[in-house]
Amino acid sequence: MPVRSAALLLYRRRAAVEVWIAHMGGPFWASKDEGAWSLPKGIVEADDRGDELSAARREFAEEIGSPAPDADYVALGDFRGSGKTIVVFAAEAEFDPEAVRSNTFELEWPPRSGRMRTFPEVDDARWFSVDDARTKLTKAQRPILDALLAHLDDDAEIH
């Protein structure tokens, strides 16, 4: 079965629409900025089938260190990239945690050194305008921003 991840995309309206994204942790991403950010997300486990929003909320809390805000989440769609499918739920929300405290992973570092080190999955997260986020997100996740903007345009036409 193909790998499936669930993600939350928080947005807020300022002078421009802003989105909350996270910088990937670990030594590979440490000195990178462009293309090194992601939506907080994680694997949909077998127990999560049928409740992917709960999976997205759990993974958000693990990667950010704060519970996802209570908001009206809408399914934004499924997006393919990097050998997996990401199901994305979006919500307008104010979110300003005191700190980002991600869960961690172990990795042999430096490679072939025999030393295992612990790194955070996420080492930074914050608000960016959609234009700035478009360059920061991985290429596979950039179409999610277009889907968000289309959703906001559709929502504006309804109201």
Image (tube, grey):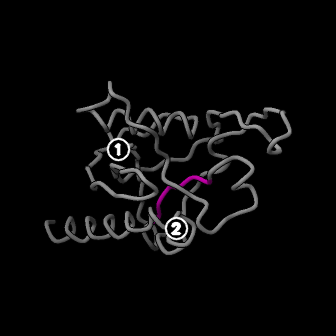
Residue 112: which quarter of the image?
top right
**Residue occupied by mark 2:** 133
Residue 40 % position (x, y): 49, 47
Q: Is residue 91 left or right of residue 105?
A: left
Looking at the image, tell me whether mark 2 or mark 1 is earlier in sequence order. 1
**Residue occupied by mark 1:** 2
| 3 shown above or below 126 | above
Q: Is residue 21 magenta?
A: yes
Residue 47 % position (x, y): 32, 24
At 38% from the left and 68% from the top, the residue drawn is 143
| 32 shown above or below 53 | below
Query: Residues in magenta?
Result: 18-23
Residue placed most toward the observer, 73 or 95 = 73
Q: Amino acid at mark 2?
A: Ala
Residue 63 % position (x, y): 56, 39
Q: Amino acid at mark 1?
A: Pro
* Quarter containing the C terminus: bottom left
Instruction: Give the farthest residue toward the left.
Output: 158
How far apart marks 2 and 1 lie (CA) works out to: 27 Å
| 54 shown above or below 29 | above
Give the prevailing secondary structure in the magenta stretch: strand
